[in-house]
Amino acid sequence: MLMPSGAGHDAMHMHSICEEGAGMIFVPSVEGISHSPKEYTKIQDIVAGIELMIKAILQLANE
């Protein structure tokens, strides 16, 4: 799923060493709270994000 975002985070700084760009994997925070001490992400969502990252890395490595 493509989810355009205004968030740049560290990905925008990667352009200087990775001209093809960078991607980010977002996982949901409970009640949508982020960038706050109240931010909380369920472990199953963190695991899903990690599994997606592993699949993406393996796919890119095999291209």
Image (cartoon, rainbow, N blue to C red):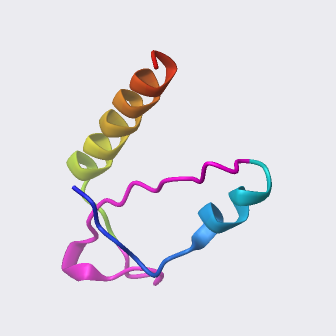
> Does 52 sit above or below residue 12?
above
Point out residue 7 in the picture as x, y percentages from the top left corner. 49, 77
Extreme-right residue of the structure = 16
> Does 54 sit above or below residue 41?
above
Point out residue 19 in the picture as x, y percentages from the top left corner. 69, 51
Image position of 30 (left or right of 17) = left
Image position of 33 (left or right of 31) = right
- Considering the whole magenta stretch, tell me its main secondary structure: loop
Point out residue 54 in the picture as x, y percentages from the top left corner. 40, 29
Name the residue: 39% across, 24% down.
59
Name the residue: 35% across, 72% down.
4
> Does 49 sit above or below residue 10?
above
Question: Is 37 in front, or is 25?
Answer: 25
Image position of 8 (left or right of 35) = right
Magenta span contains residue 29: yes
Q: Quadrant of the N terminus?
A: bottom left
Q: How many marks?
A: 0
Point out residue 40 in the picture as x, y percentages from the top left corner. 33, 69
Name the residue: 26% across, 66% down.
28
Magenta residues, as a range?
A: 18-39
Name the residue: 39% across, 33% down.
56
Which image quadrant for residue 62? top left
Magenta span contains residue 51: no
> Does 7 sit above or below residue 26?
below
Which image quadrant for residue 41? bottom left
Extreme-top residue of the structure = 62
